[in-house]
């Protein structure tokens, strides 16, 4: 895997240590490589030979994202092996809603200084999720930027490239009034809303990270670090034609993300009593006296992905995905109404 | 162009302003889109339909990079429209050495707060270089991360995806002793060595950014912000079969980057008197009393790209590229000897 580590003498970097780390990275990345990855050439670029067999009109689908201030929870707890998984899974979901399967992922780590243990944990997160998601970790950049980051902190960015055959692309154009909205459960905040959540839970309520909060079994840290689920394998396993559209519920929540896939004249009508809002969101809402509408615009509220299926197939879709019917498409403006 | 801007109420973000900025981005990005870019769907992923006509065995070549602490010069001077160009061109060069043409680019901007003017300047840099390089700016993420970055500062990461037909891939395997090294001139530090350069020029020598340094016509700021050149169009214009290999001279300099493309048994012998080392590097070297070997390992020393061509074609290659013969491939260890 081509990875460049900038190690200038004056930055006080232990180059031998850096080289040992790099070797470890190579092994982690290699474990994510299938037959589509070609052997590296000089390390300038990652080489991927996509299997186009049976595709009529291949379209590359790409997306870039970060982890946001979920990173701050990793910094506070010293646990760095989950944020890379969050980023990979977030990216996979972002292209899954178009019907794409992931091909490869490239990461960027910017930080003050290379701590080999932390670095390896981050990389392990990327590799773990890539391997589980059938996605090759094909490139990365680690930038040591003296004076740019706070000591011990880092930022992450990830880019995914996937592929879909154009006739099978989910563009939402087949969505009709009468279709059913199936919500796939989330497991926490995923990768959004952490600035607000931290402000309320940690600053205002002063809840300790190392203890369970009210009504929770795990520590608050564990709840806040739960890995963003990858919904793509489940979506890809559905019978052809079942899905008319899908929305990944990220920043902007149900209110902003669902309209992105709706055609003109279609409104998403959601029954907010059709699923149990997880305790973590209630804690944030009540603790911060956050207006309900804002909650639905910042957080996923327990629904990580929404699938839109014809009503006749809704029963089967629920059975196959273990999802919940959370609403329906009705005639109206291209928006979301939550009742 | 799918671009997500996280704007939580508590972050004090002017959402209307954010929306106006987003519109501006859309126009900038749209100007880089050719027929291979499909209309956006919901904005979750960027859609690119590569023209595979005439390709026998298409291979996707990808790379990710940052700008390093060249950003600190942008912060110090308030000039933000060049760093995006640096990043795009750096990425294009990284895949050009494998023979790939760029398809699309995705950017990541992480920062404390969204300053719409700075933000637009950065984006303009990305769009300018993408357009000039025939590369679609197809996606981006702007993350506002309270408490992560210093006020007014940001980090950038960029990912490029290009394509090459496998039979035309430059893998260095045809390089033979007797081949000639052609150096393509650089125009400054490009995107590497800024931590060391800043330390010596600004901290040790206390040179002012707004005045020309000794022997220079432009201000030091202008010299340090010169945009990393894109060598790909020149390389792509060479007759088929002329290039046996190419090395982008980035972090690691000639010493570390050239061996990456050499086959076993081939050494690159470079005559350091065959080109004039630009004044900027001499200033750094003498001002910081940097050992010569370290100079060649941190900086490009005036050579931004090295092309490896058969001796019989060297004259034509020099004529076509306006490059310089800087050395030859000889029998030996897979390394670089500079004399």
Image: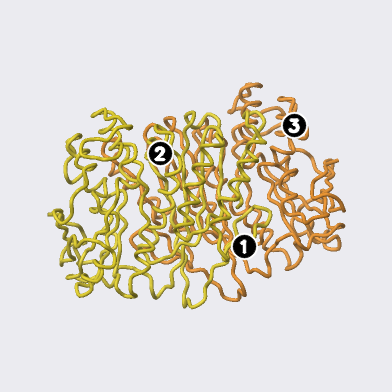
Chain colours: A orange, B yellow
Residue assigned mark 3: A282
Of tags 2 and 3, the one toward the viewer is 2
Of the residues under marks 2 and 1, which one precedes in the sequence? 1
Query: Tag 1: Cα neighbours inside 10 Å, few (<14), some, or many (≥20)?
Result: some
Q: Are marks 3 and 1 in contact (CB under 8 Å)?
A: no
Tell me whether marks 2 and 3 sit on the same chain: no
Q: Chain of mark 3?
A: A
Q: Are marks 2 and 3 in contact (CB under 8 Å)?
A: no
Chain where mark 2 sits: B
Mark 2 in CB contact with mark 1 (< 8 angstroms): no
Q: Chain of mark 1?
A: B
Q: In the rendered image, which residue does mark 1 sit on?
A: B38
Q: Is residue A28 left or right of residue B30?
A: left
Q: Quadrant of residue A240?
A: bottom right
Q: Is residue B171 left or right of residue A157?
A: left
> Residue at image x 76%, y 54%?
A262
- Residue B132 rendering spot, x and y as whole percentages: 45, 57
Q: Pinpoint residue B40: horizontal percent, then vertical percent.
A: 65, 57
On the image, numbered disc 2 is attached to which residue? B71
> For residue A46, which numbered disc appears in the image?
none
Front one among B221 and A84? B221
Crowding around mark 3 (Cα neighbors within 10 Å: few <14, some 14 to 19, many 20+) is some
Element class at badge 1: loop
Instruction: Give the percent coordinates (x, y) of residue A235.
Output: 69, 59
Residue at mark 2 shares a chain with residue at mark 1: yes
Task: State which quadrant residue A271 falls in.
Answer: top right
Residue at 63 percent of width and 28 percent of height: B12
Q: Who is closer to the viewer here, B272 or A20?
A: B272
Location of the C terminus of chain A (image quadrant): top right
Pointer 2: residues within 10 angstroms few (<14), some, or many (20+)?
Answer: many
Separation of disc 2 and disc 1 at Cα? 33 Å
**On the picture, is A110 further left or further right than B306?**
right
């Amino acid at each position: 895997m081509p990875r460049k580590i900038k190690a200038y003498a004056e930055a006080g970097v232990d180059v031998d240590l850096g080289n040992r780390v790099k070797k470890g990275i190579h092994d982690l990345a290699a474990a994510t490589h299938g037959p589509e990855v070609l052997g590296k050439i000089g390390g300038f670029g990652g080489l991927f030979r996509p299997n186009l067999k049976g595709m009529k009109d291949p379209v590359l689908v790409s997306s870039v994202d970060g982890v946001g201030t979920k990173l701050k929870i990793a910094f506070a707890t010293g646990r760095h092996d989950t944020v890379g998984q969050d980023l990979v899974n977030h990216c996979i979901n972002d292209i899954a809603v178009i019907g794409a399967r992931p091909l490869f992922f490239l990461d960027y780590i910017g930080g003050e200084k290379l701590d080999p243990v932390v670095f390896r944990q981050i990389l392990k997160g990327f590799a773990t999720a890539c391997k589980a998601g059938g996605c090759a970790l094909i490139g990365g950049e680690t930038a040591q930027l003296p004076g740019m980051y706070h000591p011990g902190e880092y930022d992450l960015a990830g880019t995914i490239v996937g592929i879909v055959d154009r006739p099978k692309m989910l563009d939402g154009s087949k969505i009709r009034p009468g279709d059913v909205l199936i919500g796939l459960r989330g497991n926490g905040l995923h990768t959004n809303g952490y600035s607000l959540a931290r402000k309320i839970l940690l600053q205002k309520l002063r809840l300790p990270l190392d203890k369970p909060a009210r009504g929770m079994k795990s520590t608050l840290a564990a709840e806040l670090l739960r890995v963003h689920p990858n919904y793509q394998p489940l979506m890809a396993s559905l019978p052809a034609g079942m899905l008319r559209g899908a929305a990944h519920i990220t920043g902007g929540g149900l209110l902003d993300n669902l309209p992105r896939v709706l055609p003109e004249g279609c409104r998403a009508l959601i029954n907010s009593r059709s699923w149990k809002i997880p305790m973590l969101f209630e804690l944030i809402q009540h603790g911060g006296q956050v207006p309900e509408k804002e909650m639905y615009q910042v957080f996923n509220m327990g629904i990580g992905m929404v699938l839109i299926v014809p009503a006749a197939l809704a029963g089967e879709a629920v059975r196959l995905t273990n999802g919940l019917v959370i609403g329906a498409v009705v005639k109206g403006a291209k928006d979301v109404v939550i009742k």
